Image (tube, rainbow, N blue to C red):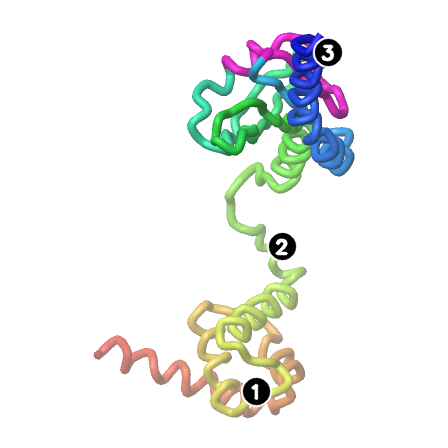
Amino acid sequence: MAKRAEAGSTKSAVQEDILQFVPIAEAVATLLKPHAEVVIHDLRTQTIAHIANNLSRREIGGSSLAELKDIGALGTDVIGPYRKTNFDGRQLKSITAVLRTKAAEPFGLLCINFDIAPIEAARDALNLLTAFQGTGAQPSALFRTDWQETVNSAIADFLGERGLAASALAKEDHAALIEALEEDGYFAIRNLVPYLAKLLGISRATVYKHLRDARQKKPQAAEE
């Protein structure tokens, strides 16, 4: 009788030490539902002790041999992430935590299997939307239509590189901006001078002065 009672208490202890991780498995599966399942394996019996949000259609009490083959050595506490293929062909991103006794002996595995198919589909859709079919220059007709937007973008880049605000530009900032626009050929655009004057809050004469100074610097830079 004593031996039978002792055996029964041992079995109960074995169940408790592996099943204490069930709330963790359920919590992770609930957070990531419906895209992840969490499986607890008992290494002593090489069977599945618990499945939360079952995506793989395995059963509690089923064999863990396939999982053990995928994982390999248990030398580290966290294994992965690694790729797996579900029964229906879906790709899973998996990671495994090794459950150990106080003596550091592995007795169980907690495996999270995340279905990455929806994420890969979204990635492919974004790649399709952002892909350019050609790398040719912007058509001249479109450039003429949107020249103000183009100039605005160039000014925004100038301000961003220098950490400046358009409303707080000093005289030397106006000169540097006009010089930068001249270097990039923007003054070939008709009506740019009055547009800049209005945008910067300065006179056309001031724009022309900064432009003249910028153009006078070019020969000097070439000589140097």
Whether residue 38 sits left or right of residue 162 in the image: it is right
Q: Can residue 58 be seen in this view?
A: no
- In the rendered picture of this protein, how many numbered marks are placed on residues? 3
Task: Please state which amino acid type lies under the numbered disc 2.
Answer: Ala
Q: Position of residue 166 (x, y in %)?
A: 61, 81
Quarter of the image where one finds residue 199: bottom right
Task: Please state which amino acid type lies under the numbered disc 1.
Answer: Leu
Confirm whether the magenta stretch covers residue 158. no
Task: Please state which amino acid type lies under the numbered disc 3.
Answer: Glu
Disc 3 to disc 2, how far (Cα)? 66 Å
The part of the chain drawn in magenta is 45-69
Confirm whether the magenta stretch covers residue 53. yes
Front tag of 2 and 1:
1
Asked whether 135 or 216 is in front, the reply is: 135
* Pointer 3 residue: 59
Q: Residue at x 73, y 11 (%)?
A: 59
Mark 3 surroundings within 10 Å by alpha-carbon count, few (fewer than 14), some (14 through 19), many (20 or more): few
Disc 2 to disc 1, how far (Cα)? 32 Å
Q: Please, is residue 90 above or below residue 21 in the view? A: above
* Pointer 2 residue: 141
Q: Where is residue 181 in the image (x, y as percent from the top left)?
A: 49, 73
Quarter of the image where one finds residue 18: top right
Q: Which of marks 1 and 3 is nearer the N terminus?
A: 3
Name the disc covering residue 193, or none.
Answer: none
If the image is split into quadrants, where does the N terminus sit?
Answer: top right
Mark 1 element type: loop
* Pointer 1 residue: 169
Q: Earlier in the sequence, mark 3 or mark 2?
A: 3
Q: Which residue is drawn at 54% across and 68% down?
A: 157
Q: Can residue 157 be seen in this view?
A: yes
Front tag of 1 and 3:
3
